[in-house]
Amino acid sequence: MPYAFDEIIETLRMVALEALDIRTTTLGVSLRSCVGNDVHKVADAVYTRLMRAGTPLIPAAKRVEARYGIPIVNKRIALTPVALLCDGLDTEDPTPIAHAIDRAARDLGIDFIGGYTAHVEKGMTIGDRRLIASLPSALSTTERMCASINAGSTHAGINMEAVAWLGRLIKDMAALTADRGGIACGKFAVFCNAPQDNPFMAGAQHGIGEPEVVINVGISGPGVVRHVVEQIPDADFTVLAESIKRTAFKITRAGELIGRAVAEELGVPFGIVDISLAPTPLKGDSVGDILAAMGLECAGTHGSTAALALLNDCVKKGGAMASSAVGGMSGAFIPVSEDAHMIAAAERGVLTIDKLEAMTSVCCVGLDMIAVPGDTPAETLSAIIADELAIGMINNKTTAVRIIPAPGKKVGESVEFGGLLGTAPIMAVHKESSVNFIKRGGRIPAPIQGMTN
């Protein structure tokens, strides 16, 4: 579909006045050629592979930025799940591979690189166990590498052995980075139904069904949608929905244009455009502000789940109409520490973990960048993860948890991460124990709706 002159002018206006940008162009890179048994040789092969594939990314993205006048905020890389490289290693510790990945990201000028990942929804291989066991060491000794574990799916159920283990490891990650507010936990997410073409961190990965290399794009645009909603304060929900859909259509078209241009510059295939509304701590770049513009005094109050459901659905409908290449997670993100409105709502006590859990049933991702007291038991963390994965499993959607038990912090305090990760208010968790529930282990079976064959 050709781009009309008026559409181009409107897109440039969105960039200039409403903070429209391309949040990330993410280069997916297969590491399957790097397999071996000597961990140091594998690490060297991974570094060489990333440098060869990744060196052209930033120059190509900058050329496209200059050509179209649309900012590309982040240039990133997603990897084949690294657990696939760990089965045949001659050591139990794959941390040298993590260090090679992190070094490549630094040398390439990439802010984050994802794919230190395993899929264990139905069980764990030797390589999966090795990678999971290494998470505290790997994430506490790297700066740019992100990790994720897919521990549940609609077709397989929830691996509660993995969920229990991950609760303990998250505590270890926080302790090892206590001097930095537990930052290692901010680079780690636990998923149900993780998409394998996700360009957003911390869950970005390059799935096994992907080509050798590919460009995936994640758009942004909370400010654009908020502006549209503010222009029709008295409109009914039918009119509001149509306005949001039209806006999502426009920003998706801009995202696909940029993604295809970067892919062409690199001479690699274009994959998908992820149409998620991704907030930042900057003023005016907030999903919470969109909910407020719909008529809510504060995100988290009664009506927030309905408002978010409308927003998420309209973004998906508008994006799907604009492009046949929509993928990734595609919806609306509600990461507390990365959204100025959500931060304020949590500080006021209006936005609670329980309300966030309800809201995640109608949006993408899940409990994202949630900080809780540092003395929260590991079993409570595991139970929070299990609750969120259950929402994804039953509703056949992607959900995830990125939670930080901030060392030494209590409810009413906050932890500062800086940059994109923002400031996280410490949110209360229930004091009642979940220990006996978590220690059962085993696997929560797949629901009946998983039997779709």
Image: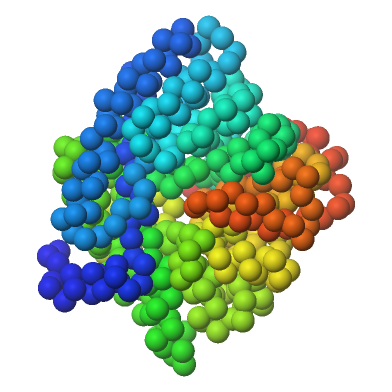
Res 427 visible? yes
Relative depth, front residue between 180 and 105 = 180
79 vs 63: above or below: above
> Which residue is outermost to the bottom?
234
Taking the image as drawn, is residue 269 in sight? no
Where, by quadrant of the figure, is residue 176 drawn? top right
As drawn, is 334 to the left or to the right of 374?
A: left
- Quick one: 344 or 379, which is closer to the camera? 344
Residue drawn at the location 12% of the way across and 65% of the way down: 2
Quarter of the rendering occupied by the N terminus: bottom left
Seen at 43% across and 47% down, the residue is: 200
Where is residue 34 shown, x and y percent of the image? 37, 17
Q: Residue at x 67, y 44 (%)?
A: 181
Residue 268: % across, % down: 20, 37
Relative depth, front residue between 225 and 360: 225
Q: Which residue appears at 77% of the width and 39% of the height?
A: 378
* Colour theme: rainbow
The image position of residue 145, as x and y in percent, is: 48, 34
Picture layout, residue 120 above or below residue 320? above
181 to the left or right of 278: right
Task: Locate residue 33: give its quadrant.
Answer: top left
